[in-house]
Amino acid sequence: MKLAIRGGEPVRKRPFPDWPIWNDTERRGLNRVLESGKWGSLQGQEVRQFEREFAKYQGAEFGIAVTSGSAALEVSLRAVGIEAYDEVLIPAYTFVATATAVLVNAAIPVFVDIDLETYNMSTTSLEQALTPSTRAIMPVHFAGRPANMDEIEQFARDHNLYIIEDAAQGWGAQWRGQGVGTFGDFGCFSFQSSKNISSGEGGIILTNDEELARMASSYMNCGRVEGAIWYAHYHLGSNYRMTEFQAAVLSGQLSRYDQQLEHRQQNMALLDNALQALEGVQPLTGDARITRHAGHIYIFRYNAEAFDMLSKEGFVSALQAEGIPCSGGYSLPLYKQPIFRNQSYGPFTKILREKARYENVNLPNTEKACFEEAIWLPQRVLLGSVEDMRDIVRAIEKIYDNRHELI
């Protein structure tokens, strides 16, 4: 059968499920806020209710809703006391906000490599990245897959480091039955448009430490302190407050999330089993300690040698032509992003120029993921049917069988 990218019929023409998914629950919530006249969280109750709901869902004591996942990271670093020139260990295969949250606190991101079996931070590379200036570690639960919190917690204890979990993609994910975002000092989540629980934008900070919760709440709310004079500002905070409209939508999204999560997990298991049997592709390695995977992105590894050296970009184009939404994921390691190449650090450029240098950084697994092997399927695909998952498998098989057409 001729490949679609060469003029043949695609494996599928019907669309996968769209995103976001919503119904009258969100509509009623928005109308409730609209008609209340209390649109901001300082006056209403929707944000406070969602903070309690989400913290309980994930297994944390306190929740502080904010404007974005990026803001959650920035506030959390500030709340634990990260200062200028402190170093924070982060993976180089993640969204840029993981690094810029460090920079906007005048601190130094130190990049570590990933494990190609998991696409999460490689715990074996942490020791060599450690210096006397290291103050925190920021593991990312990438694609919704929990990082190895056993080893990360032990490393942090051994070296007296704060843990800020970047759980932007990790709603509902669990490591050994415990919700991600509840292991460290803070856990940070995102509700941006593509996320599995979405209000267009928004985020939340979780913690089990009451004093840290108070500090994060102050930095989130213009440096105010609860119970003090309203126009007294104690810390260098800003306005990172979530709106009542966003919280109302998020409560509706959370109400159906468990059902969607189970659906995604079933389809991920189906794809794992099917792709293991195919030539040239490989699912990520399973781990019994992962008791729930959030399934924000389904990642599989592409082997160009099996496809007669067809580039990753060529494979992605062929798969898209067959009707499968996919991408090659991050095209650059963070340390090769223009912001780091050009040292464009805004007001902190002068003070960080000598220390935040990355021209000699080379992390082989991260580069392999970016340039050679990572293939992403978005979370909405995982809400499809069993037959939809079979179409993904059929499309990959078709490309493999006709790979000579692409060389």
Image: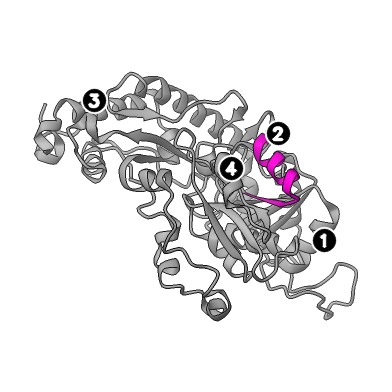
Quote the CA–CA distance across marks 4 and 3: 31 Å
* Residue identifier under label 3: 397
Magenta: main secondary structure equals helix
Instruction: Find residue 274 and report its horizontal and vertical position in percent.
Output: 36, 21
Query: Which numbered marker is on residue 161?
Result: none
* Residue identifier under label 1: 214
- Identified by mark 1, the residue type is Arg
Point 32% across, 24% down: residue:
390
- Identified by mark 4, the residue type is Gly
Quote the CA–CA distance across marks 1 and 2: 23 Å
Compare marks 1 and 2 and give the one earlier in the sequence: 2
Q: Secondary structure at mark 1?
A: helix
Query: Which quarter of the figure is the C terminus placed in?
Result: top left
Disc 4 crowd rating (10 Å Cα; few below 14, some 14-19, many 20+) is many
* Residue identifier under label 2: 178
Instruction: Find residue 101 and report its horizontal and vertical position in percent.
Output: 59, 63
